[in-house]
């Protein structure tokens, strides 16, 4: 045959939080893709349908948004007191690139269920009814996450009445704990400051809070860049000048945070850091048409992922929001009214989200012990994904 036939790879398509992605067990991948490298990246790109110059991912499993262009690889954990290793790959839509630099907090909610269903959790630790505690090693950032997965009659319970803004249908609640959520091994505030002056080409000097918690995130005040904090996707994603401004802030912040050495290097690192803007509470209408009253939230937050305003909120960015809100003096904390707090409820384009966080100051350095939020997850399809055998 002139052309290589398609091959089948066992896979599960899952929603986790406000994201969805293709989940694999490491041992099920083709041998060449079982180790990090170009073969693995090429395989995942073909599975998702990237790079796609049309921006649709029609010839793959991706949904043409940052929330739906995701892949997960799980394997038995080699870490003590952990059940499973979780590796996340954010697949670029229009470029031949898989970003391994950060975690996906939303899909973390699905990792626990997938780990149980795939046999990564010892049967003795899986209750017939109740809550199964799944100990996850997040391999991208080297952190522990604990997912509390409901079980009914020996099976993962996926249906329920827990509602999550940004997800259409209710499902079972999964509580997720991000332990020691400061990203990587460096300081939570890499510059040593709660607020920095960031000089950005063609923008000027902006007050920013730059934090490594959940995922490296740069916060700016909405008012400083001409926004109110009530914006929905269409207000920003169709504005090329606005997107260019946010990208300029992001790459300059990446250098100041020490994540990269140059602006050029930052431009090729799409997944991290995230850029978000905050504002004090206001009334607004969410993308679903739901009215959000200022009295319901502590602050408003809008965040960009992979160059576009997110339709809700990334789970890892929610960890950054909760952690920053718990530390008096950050832009996030000030937008929420200042002072000490152990949880925060913020408004995002799809509605509201509450996240808890614990932070403490030790010898002049802030540290976060954990952040907690509730999400939900569901299997959408399981079986095999097919790709041409010569695509990797």
Image (cartoon, rainbow, N blue to C red):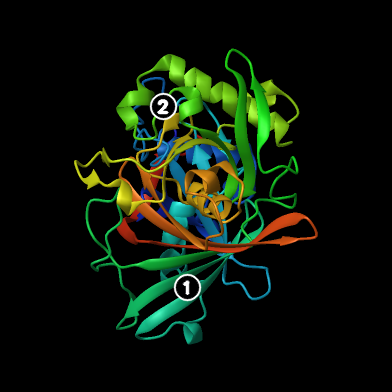
Vertical side of 83 occupied by 46: above or below: above
| Residue indicated by mark 1 | 119
| Residue indicated by mark 2 | 227
Q: Residue at x 45, y 14 (%)?
A: 241
Q: Quadrant of residue 200?
A: top right
User: Number of callouts in the render?
Assistant: 2
Q: Position of residue 110 (x, y in %)?
A: 41, 60
Instruction: Look at the image and tell me whether residue 392 can be seen.
Output: no
Q: In which quarter of the image is residue 180?
A: bottom right
Q: Which residue is drawn at 63% across and 45% down?
A: 211
Specify which label sits upstream in the sequence, 1 or 2. 1
Vertical side of 266 occupied by 44: above or below: below
Circles 1 and 2: CB distance less than 8 Å? no
- The answer to whether residue 156 is left or right of residue 325 is left
Task: Classify mark 1: helix, strand or loop.
Answer: loop
Between circles 1 and 2, the one closer to the viewer is: 2
């Amino acid at each position: 045959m002139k052309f290589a036939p398609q091959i089948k790879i066992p896979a599960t398509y899952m929603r986790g939080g406000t994201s969805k992605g293709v989940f694999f067990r490491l041992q099920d991948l083709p041998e060449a893709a079982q180790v990090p490298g170009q073969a693995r990246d090429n395989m995942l790109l073909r599975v998702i349908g990237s790079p796609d110059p049309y921006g649709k991912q029609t010839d793959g499993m991706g949904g043409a948004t940052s929330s739906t262009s995701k892949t997960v690889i799980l394997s038995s954990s080699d870490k003590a007191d952990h059940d499973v290793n979780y590796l996340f790959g954010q697949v670029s839509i229009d470029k031949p690139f898989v970003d391994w630099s950060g975690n996906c907090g939303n899909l973390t909610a699905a990792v626990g269920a997938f780990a149980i269903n795939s046999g990564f959790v010892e049967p003795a630790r899986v209750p017939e009814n109740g809550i199964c505690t799944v100990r996850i090693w997040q391999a991208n950032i080297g952190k522990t996450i604990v997912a509390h997965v409901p079980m009914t009659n020996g099976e993962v319970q996926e249906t329920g009445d827990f509602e999550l803004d940004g997800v259409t249908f209710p499902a079972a609640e999964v509580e997720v704990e991000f332990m020691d959520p400061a990203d990587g091994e460096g300081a939570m505030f890499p510059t040593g400051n709660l607020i920095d002056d960031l000089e950005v080409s063609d923008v000027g000097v902006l007050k920013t809070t730059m934090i490594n918690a959940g995922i490296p995130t740069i916060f700016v005040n909405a008012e400083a860049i001409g926004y109110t904090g009530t914006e929905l996707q269409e207000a920003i994603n169709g504005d090329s000048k606005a997107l260019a401004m946010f990208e300029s802030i992001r790459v300059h912040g990446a250098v100041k945070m020490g994540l990269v050495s140059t602006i050029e290097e930052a431009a090729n690192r799409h997944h991290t850091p995230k850029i978000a803007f905050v504002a004090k509470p206001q009334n607004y209408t969410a993308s679903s048409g739901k009215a959000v009253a200022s009295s319901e939230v502590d602050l408003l937050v809008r965040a960009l992922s992979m160059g576009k305003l997110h339709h809700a909120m990334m789970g890892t960015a929610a960890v950054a929001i909760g952690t920053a809100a718990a530390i008096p003096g950050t832009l996030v904390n000030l937008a929420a009214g200042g002072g000490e707090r152990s949880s925060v409820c913020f408004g995002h384009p799809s509605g509201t989200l509450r996240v808890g966080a614990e932070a403490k100051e030790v010898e002049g350095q802030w540290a976060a012990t954990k952040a907690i939020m509730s999400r939900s997850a569901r299997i959408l399809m399981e079986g095999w994904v097919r790709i041409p055998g010569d695509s990797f």
